[in-house]
Image: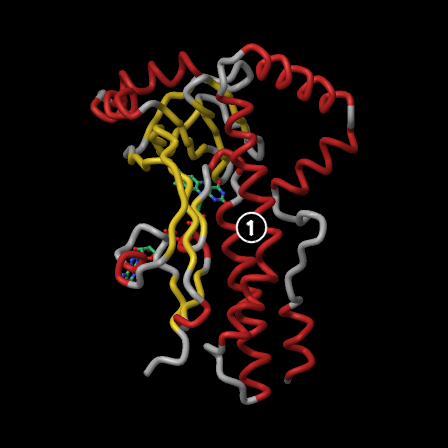
Amino acid sequence: DTALAVVADGGHGGLARLAALQRMGWDHNRHAIVATVTPREALPGIAFEHFQESGPLAFLPIGQQQFSIVWSLRPSAASQMLDLSDFAFLEALNRQRPPHLPLLSGVGPRSVYPLFFQRLWAQPSQRLALVGNAAQTLHPLAGQGYNLGLRDVVTLAALLREAAAAGHDPGARRLLEDYSQIRHRDRLETIAFTEAMNRLFSSPRLPLRFARAAALALLEQSTFGKRELAARLAGIRLPAGSSIPDLMWESVHVH
Ligand SMILES: Cc1cc2nc3c(=O)[nH]c(=O)nc-3n(C[C@H](O)[C@H](O)[C@H](O)COP(=O)(O)OP(=O)(O)OC[C@H]3O[C@@H](n4cnc5c(N)ncnc54)[C@H](O)[C@@H]3O)c2cc1C
């Protein structure tokens, strides 16, 4: 008998089916092409996100010389892009790149990820704790998935250490319910924020385009707003009402 199993298979392994987990989700009908690209002139430390109707095209700096791109495209367009030669791919990418980014002259191997939203749940009696993408898979446009998963792990680790110190069952219904409850608000708000951002930025509908332009204009005027949004996107600021246990602080006290 296993006291507790932590499910961390990224949500695309066979564990959801095996454990008959409850699922809610939808397909974004977009595929993301991921590759490392090199610009003609170095532009270290600056990230770009260019919103298009098919979804965002993000350039995330790696080191001093390169960017990792995440390019969201309709599935058929993504498979066409995968089949192009490096030269033709760079030509297509250069046509779509944001205005301030220098010409791109090199590209590494390309891979593709289908984009979907998914939440999975286990029953508290199943002695399963879901962390990271195994609990929730988000659209990558806001770069929230990894930090959200880390916050799952930190919370679960703190609860398990507390249970171990007290000699309690690590897979107890009460512990698993506490885990879900502590993570509930952060998970829900991060999902809502990410999904709303995706809808707002990818919709061709006129009212949403106006709302988007107005929101961006407001943001441009507000240093405070920009700082808050950056802190939220970087995972430094959590949604109001969410908290994660301070693992470092607790470890000082345990030892
Ligand atoms: C294109 C793209 C761009 C992204 N960009 C960002 C970003 O900028 N910032 C951000 O925060 N997040 C980003 N994300 C999300 C981020 O990648 C995920 O949130 C994160 O990887 C989740 O980590 P995880 O360990 O839960 O799952 P995964 O990274 O999927 O890892 C699960 C692991 O489990 C293994 N596994 C599966 N089944 C089994 C099994 N049965 N037995 C043993 N091992 C198994 C898999 O091989 C895999 O190694 C992006 C995602 C995508 C698709």
Q: Which residue is mark 1?
A: 187
Viewer-nearest residue: 220 or 75: 75
* Model colouring: secondary structure
**Residue 174 screen position, x and y as percent:** 55, 75
Is the C terminus in the top left, top right, bottom left or bottom right quadrant? bottom right
Answer above or below: position of 166 versus 232.
below
Q: Is residue 18 above or below residue 139?
A: below
Q: Position of residue 136 (x, y in %)?
A: 45, 50
Mark 1 neighbour class, 10 Å CA radius: few under 14, some 14 to 19, many 20 or more: many
Residue shown at the point (53%, 60%) measured from the top left: 152
Q: Nearer the viewer, residue 116 or 228?
A: 116
Please give the name of the residue rendered at 72% of the width and 31% of the height, measured from the top-left corner: 226
| Count of marks, rendered view | 1
* Mark 1: amino acid: Arg
Secondary structure under tag 1 reads helix
Query: Which residue is most to the bottom?
Result: 167
54 lies above or below 184: above
Q: Name the spot of residue 217 as percent of width and height, x first.
A: 71, 17
Q: Is residue 41 above or below residue 209?
A: below
Residue 5 picture quarter: bottom left
Q: Image quadrant for the N terminus?
A: bottom left
Percent of width and height locating residue 115: 37, 36
Q: Quadrant of residue 92?
A: top left
Foreground pick, 204 / 148: 204
For the point 72% across and 21% down, which residue is it? Answer: 220
As drawn, is 223 to the left or to the right of 214? right
Q: Is mark 1 within 8 Å of ligand 1?
A: no
